[in-house]
Structures are given as C-alpha cells and as structure tokens.
Image (tube, coloured by chain):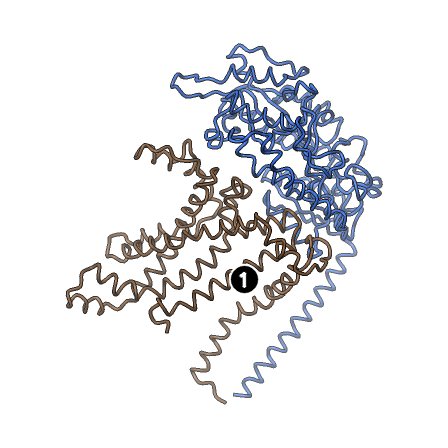
Chain colours: A blue, B brown
Amino acid sequence: MLKKFKKALSLVVCLIIFLSLFTVININNSSVEASSKIKITWMGFGQPHEKELYTKLVKKFMERYKNITVDYICTAPGQEYGMKIQAAMASGKLPDVFYVPPENLRAWVDAGKLLKITKYVKASKEINLNNIWPQAISRYMYDGKTIGKGDIYALPKDVGPFAFGYNKTMFKREGIPLPDPKKPYTWEEFTKICKKVTKDTNGDGKLDQWGTDLDVNWTLHMFVWSNGADWLDNTKTKVTIDDPKFIEALQFFADLRNKYKVTPTAVQGQSISGYQRWLNGQLAFFPVGPWDVPVYNKLKFEYDLIPPPVSPRTKKPATWLGSLGFGVASTTKYPQQAVDLAAFLSTDREGQRMAYQMGLQIPNLIDMAKNEYAKWKEKPNNKMEFIRVVEDYGRRFPFEYTYDREWYDTFYSGLQPVLDGKMTAEQYCKQVKSKIQKLLDKANQKAKK
Amino acid sequence: MKFSIYNKEKVVGYLFILAPILQFFIFALGPLIYSFYASFTDWDGLTQPSFIGLENYKEIVLDDRFWKALYNTIFYMIGIPIGMFLSIILAILMNQKLRGISIYRVIYYIPNISSLVAIAILWQWIYNPDYGILNNMLYKLFHIQGPNWLYNTTWVKPAIIIVTVWRGLGYSTLLYLAGLQNIPHVYYEAAEIDGASSLKKFIYITLPLLTPTSFYIVVTTCIGGLQMFVEPQILANNGGPEYSAATVVFYLWQKAFINYDMGYACAVAWILGAIIFVVTLIQFKYANKWVYGMD
C-alpha cells in the first residue's frame, strides 16, 4: 500500500514540476511579446448598438496604431458597471481606459484612481481641445476643491442635452399656433395650452389626451432652475430647498397634476408612463434627449424641439445637460497610449458621425454639430435646440458637485405625497430640509478627509 | 494499513466536500475577516480605511433607514408560511396518479429557474394598475378597483411577497414531493384498518413525517429571505416609494456602491449576519419540539 502511495506521490510531484516549467516558458513568451506590443484594456457599458460602434472604433484605432492591442470589455448598462469598476479600484486592477460618470469624478480623483491627463491630452495628435464643447470638458476638470477648474481627468464620451418637445400634429389638429423656438412659453402660456388639449377625444367619458406627463426625477430641474432657485447654494454646502422660489417651482410642478389637471392622475401616471403616452401621441409636450431620437423619429406624428417653459421671474429656460467621460487609470503602464485611445473614441470624426447617425448622441465636435449635424435631414428639424441647451441653458445635476448623492436621493424618496397633492411643497421642503442638510454635511466631510 | 471499502468511501466522501471547503477558505474566509475589520473603520471602498471603533454600529442604531429596511425584510418573511402551506397542498396534488403529472411538475418548477429580469418584466405587467391582468381580473370578478401595486407604500410589500412565493413554490413543492414519497405506505394501511379518515391520516401521519422537510425549508428560506435583494431591487425602483420596499441587503448595497460608505455597509452586513445566526440557532434549538426524529 505504502509503495502505491509513494508512486502516486512521485507522479503528482512530476506533474507539478512539469506544469510549472510550462508556466515559466509561457511567462517568458508573454514578456517577449510585451516589449513589442502594447496591450490596453478599456471597459465601458452600453446597449448592443453602442457596443457595435465602439468595437468598430477600436478596430480602426488598432489599424492606425499597429503596436497597440485594445481589449474592449462592455458590461450591461446600469448598476453592474458601477460595482465592477469599484471592485477593480479596490483590488488595484483598473482597466487602462474606462467610463467616468461626472458624479464620481471627485471621489475617484481624491482616491488617486484617475490619471491627470492634461499634458497627455496636449501631446496627443488625436484631439483638438478647441473643437470640443468646453461645457463637456469642464465637467472633468478638478483642482482638488472645485469641479470645472484645474487639471483634466477625463474626455467626454458625449454630452446629453435634455431638450423639450411638442407634438406638432396635435397642435395642428387642435388649431393651436405653432410655437416659435426662439420665444419660450411662459408657465402661464404653457398651462393654457395644456388645459386646451386635455380632453376626452373619443367621447367615452375618460380623458385620453393630456397637456403633458413629466417625470419629476428628470424634469423638476426645468422649473426650479428657471425660477431662479436651486437645490444647493453656490458653495455647495447649504441645502436651499426651503427657498420660496424653490417651493414655488415645486408647487407649480405638482399643480400641473392636482390643480390644473393637465397631466394624467396619480394612478394613471404611474401605470402607463409618460414616455409611453407620448409615444402613443396622447401628450402635447414631452422632453426629448438625443438618445430618444431614433425611437421618436419612427412615430406616427410629427414633433419638434422648443425650449422648456420659462418662469415669469427669470424668463430664462433651463434644463440639465448630462455627460459621461473616458478616464484613464492612474495605474496604467501606458498613459500616452491610453489617452490617445480615449481621445480617439471621444473625437474621431467618423466615429462621431456614426454615433449621431445611430442616434446615440450629438457630436462632441463643435464644428460637426453646428454644421453637418444641424443640417442633417433627419427629424427633429430644430436640432439647433440641442446645441442651444449645450451652449446656453443646460446645467449639471446638483449631485455632480457633491461627494455622494444620498442627500439628493433622500429629497426625491419622500416627494410622492407632494406630487399626489396630499402635502404642500412648502410643508415638505421645510420638513425635510434639515435631514437633507445633515446628509450633505456628511458628504462634504468625506470630501475634506 | 489497508484501505477497507469503508475507508475508501470515507476518502471519496471527503474529496466531494473538499471543493466547497476549499472554495470557502480561498474565496470567502479572507473577505469575511476583512469585512469584520472594515466594519470598525471609516472606509469609502477606494482609499485606505481608518479605524473608528464602534462608530458605525452606533450610527446604525440611530439610522431610521436601516430600521425601515430591517422591518421590510422581516415583513417579507410572511411569505414563508404562505409558501409552505401552498407547496404542501401542491405536493399532495402532484403525488396523485394523474395523467400528465410530470408536465404539471415542470410547469411549477419553471419560475424557479427563470431569469429574474424576465420575471420582473412579467410581474410589472401583471401589476400594472391600468392594463395589468391582476387589476383587470379584480375588476371583472369583484368590481374592485385594484391598487397601484408597485407604487403604493401599503401594497408594494404584499406585491413583492406574491412574486417571491410564486417563484419559490416549485422548489419547496419538489422537496415536499420527495418527502411524501418517502413515507412508507404501511402507516396509511394501518391507519385505514383502524378506520382513520383522510383528514386524520393527513394530520397524524403525513404532517409529522414531513416535519424534517419543513424544518429544512424553514431554515433555508429564512436565511435566503433575510438576504433578499434582487426582487425588490428590480420590481421597486430605488427602494420603492418612501423606501417601503427596500431590504437590508439593498440598503447595504446602496451604502457600499452608491454612497461610498463601505465600512458602514460592512457593519450592516455583520449585524445582518448576526441576526441570521441567531434566527438559525433558535430554529435548531427548538427543532426537537416539532421535528419528527430530531431528538
């Protein structure tokens, strides 16, 4: 028995030695390869058509840089990416290039995870900074205290102007004069039109056409900002939701449903989404992002872009302007090549053309956006409104300025009674302010560490 | 020393359990110990943690969101007895000699192996208050205007319980079915000779002899239930209206990955771990009072 055991043992030892020899040879091989060929990994998320675009761009990049191999990893959109990238940060195994949501910029830079890329961007042949929206680049600039100042930490993948749209076909049918895109509706005019179109069109006793149906998470900003209010003060350390101008805007938003009754009721509103009702042609007004365009262009009705309604206080339109960036890991072995890849993905002309034609985004390149894209024959006709949002009245989400967004999420999580008309905006804002202020203080303390 | 058949079996047995044991030591033990340490630190998950003693635990005691999430998690446990009751009935039905019985068995097992995302989409459609099948049925059958299930603080939890019960039904039915088929038929024959009715046979033979299966189901579903995460996450957006659908695991996930409070999240995880440990311990301690053959 012992003999058998010894035999088996020696066999195992031989096997281990043999296998380890093999790995040594393998490691040697890879080090030979590494000296001649550079390997860059880049990780993002996206829908299948987005993945297709970036796969093509990566191929084109590798054709241009024969000594670089790019390994492209694409996860599903949403939470999966966030968890993966944080795990990669914790384990020190970040991909060379990866998506940076602007809200994460401060935390990631302070933790030393993102490379300061200013000098590499300037050295890169791939990019002309003057031809990219400064409103996009500035989101990824940070001096350790303020966003928008200091070094560049990422290049924009896109800018997302959240514009406003109207149902042209419905306007014509209801005999409402078409809006002038240069002259926004005031809140009063907007409500008046909404009231006019909210009706039962087939005589079954139920409403089946409404003025609008806006999701509070994405559109409250249009009203708050236009009324001259905001969630935070300029220093981003004080919650200002008890400002009468803020309360007024929130109340107006809730009144659209409860007082003016120009949106579906609370129950109706949560059953079929506003988005679906807009697609059905049942709403006069609805927001339009560039990413919506491929779907909206297949609709049976005509639509176009206008500025969102403006408050009588400021008469200025406002909405949010989203973005996502390409960052480079501070641990990358090849900073210049990684920045070249990020710059190429961000600004390659052919890539940008494909991106807007696929309906992913408007071009990052200013000249392309203002000429080629604005004149493109596809709907919506008034594509310049998207550009006006970028250049003129688009703003960042309030949580992009703070270390985390718990304070902001808490504001929204208790808002339902206001929207249902069971509580006034004033009661809610005054009641919840101190709780949100505490959470903001906590976030700011994290930043100071 | 000679290998007897008994010894050989022993070795094979150990080899079989070696995989999960090794897996535990390699992949779980390290993170487990580290997370215990991390629960005493202020750690954002990105930079170095700094030791703060019991601060996280003290904060959790005063954290109303944690208590709300814990309350919700315990509330969801109502689904366990409901699920067990339904699966015993189903198992008895499926234990009959019916034509095409295996088709029924497969049908009830399908939800258990289906993709959770597909299930979420299906149930979101069922629960839709305007055109959903559930409210339509309620109206047509009883003239009741059903609630807005997933967006209502009162109804969101029962709605999620229904989904979890439905999803777990196939699995526990399968276990009960196996339990039923293990009951020797002679007991029933003896009872019949004594003139016992079907109900009495069920109460005095079937139920007691199924208690080991019930015990297994109670323990495993309690552990699983306390760790519930996916169903509320995908059915109820961002913790549901006023956080009424969030579970403890959802809360700790939000803390760890959205709000950069990894140390705090670790503390929440350890509190949850302690709760699960105590609940399981109590179950084992009192098992001999009701589980047949546990003495």
Q: Is residue A114 left or right of residue B121?
A: right
Image spot of residue A233 (x, y percent)? 73, 34
In the depicted view, which residue is nearer to us: B19 or A372? B19
Along the line of sight, which residue is nearer the eye, A371 or B85?
A: B85
- Residue A356 lies, in percent from the top left, at 66, 30
Q: Residue at x 73, y 54 (%)?
A: B47
Answer above or below: position of B167 versus B284: above
Q: Amino acid at mark 1?
A: Ala
A29 horizontally vs A248: left or right: right
| Vertical order, B218 against A266 (above or below) | below
Snapshot quadrant of residue B54: bottom right
Identified at 43% across, 62% down, the residue is B219
Q: Does A112 appear above or below A133?
A: below
**Residue receiving disc 1:** B274
Which of the chains bears the disc numbered 1? B
Q: Residue at x 44, y 49 (%)?
A: B114
